[in-house]
Amino acid sequence: MISVARLRRATRRETVGVDVGAALNLVGALVKYLSLTFLLPLAVALGYGESPWPFAAAAVCSFGTGFAVERATRGKEQVGAREGFLVVSLTWLVTAALGAIPYLLSGNDELSSPLDAYFEAMSGFTTTGSSVVTDFEGLTHSLALWRQFSQWLGGMGIIVLALAVLPRLRVGGRQLFESEVPGPETERLTASIRETARRLWLLYFGLTVTLIAILTALGLTGLDERMDLYEAAAHAFATMPTGGFSTQGRSIEAFGAATQWTLSLFMLLAGMNFALLFAALVQRRTRPLLRDQELRLYLALLGVATLVLALELAGEGLYAGEQAIRHAVFQTVSTMTTTGFASADFTTWTTLTAVILVGLMFIGGSAGSTAGSVKVVRHLLIGKVLRRELDQTVHPEIVSPIPLNGSVVQERTLRAVIAFVLLYVGLFAVGALLITLDEALANSRVTAFEAVAASATTLGNVGPAFGFAGPMGSFEPFSDLSKAVMIVLMWLGRLEIIPVIVLFTKRYWRT
């Protein structure tokens, strides 16, 4: 039974509209604790004899900004569903701005522009992997590691991390968790949102440490002589969040076959539902994993795309035998999970492979994974909706609820899925149009297909595009306006559009 006091509080909150002060108060708390993340690259800088100043300054700015905002406002404990959208959207914008400080202070010419530094930081925290860097040798060890580490922080989500480790944020946690974690539905492992977030982060951390250990072992045993502890940590930080940044200008092509096969496996895991992975790997409950319809479709799509790519690469004489299979597996998994690593320069492959890879950018991984894009479950549900419509066209009297893993999907959820896909396609088209027009006015060499790929890869948080922005290239030649458009697309894509778009509606702000 709902108490009278609780009903009055709910009614009062409904009449006052969005509590901006409470939202800013929580954003300030999150930003304040973000300052701790700069300690890792600072320690690496000291270890390699590099200047720790950029990271120390960023830590001070982060703590000072968060502290000032938190002290100037109050009410984080009152954050509800409406404020949650504002908190999530603002946190990612501010985090990227603070994450750009080390780039600006590093003295690196390629990252000296505030827009380029913000592009790189947004790409990192949103786990996109698109980069304006061309001279990777010019990056210090600490700055390169910060690029990688920013992706790891953004992978499972800064707010989910806060819910896992900061007891003060338990109030309003459900709204933040559901706004932050990708996918139309998020399976909770426990009744407590904080405990669920903590378990997901423990699994995420455990898989990252495991990958670091395996990659380091490959280097120590001579299976990949270029792989050492630093490279292992750097690439594990980009693999588990399906980020795609690399310390090497040639991405994963610079490493051996053993490393490429290992990363393929862990990218595959990162693209799966982490709640199901936790149940299977930690709780030893494999039945939910085996019965999951989304997982079956996820693996089937990867299998079909890999087979077509392998046959095309071998048939065209680009690779043979194990090489053809390895590059097909790696690039299919990397693209569909929106990781963005490259084992070879796929822009030199055939037209068919290009079409397949761009198509995979629109599929994405599973709901509840670190992958971006539309997500497999949404494609699955839309397919079921289309099938029902065809059945009801022939037999209008049929009442046909849509099942998923043994449960009936609510019509409200189906409408939300359709709305999301329509918004996604619309934003992709607008982004591609704006980039095309801007580059045409600037008389650049960007083709329509390259603009389409740039829009798709940034909105889907995939990473590489085609042309000069391919896997071995850079987004640096794009104009400032095009970069700004892509920054917005990365931000929208990481937050799955709705939490941001809702901020621009009158009803959201209206009392």
Image (cartoon, helix red, strand yellow):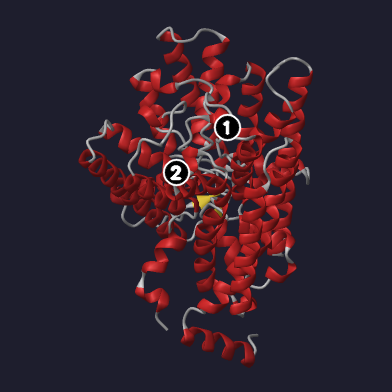
Label number found at residue 246:
1
Quadrant of the drawing holding the C terminus: bottom left
Q: Residue at x 53, y 41 (%)?
A: 365
* Residue 352 x %, y %: 36, 21
Q: Secondary structure at mark 1?
A: loop
Using residue 412 as the reference point, say whether residue 265 is left or right of it.
right
Identity of the amino acid at label 1?
Ser
Of tags 2 and 1, the one toward the viewer is 1
Mark 2 is surrounded, within 10 Å at the Cα level, by few (under 14), some (14 to 19) or many (20 or more) other residues, namely many
Q: Residue at x 78, y 20 (%)?
A: 220
Depth check: give the residue in front, 282 or 434. 434
Depth check: give the residue in front, 411 or 476. 476
* Residue 99 x %, y %: 57, 52
- Mark 2–mark 1 contact, CB under 8 Å? no
Give the Cα distance between marks 2 and 1: 19 Å
Depth check: give the residue in front, 181 or 466. 466
* Residue 91 x %, y %: 55, 61
Mark 1 is surrounded, within 10 Å at the Cα level, by few (under 14), some (14 to 19) or many (20 or more) other residues, namely many
Residue tagged by mark 2?
Answer: 460
Examine the rendering and report whether any part of residue 351 can be seen: yes
Identity of the amino acid at label 2?
Gly
Q: Earlier in the sequence, mark 2 or mark 1?
A: 1
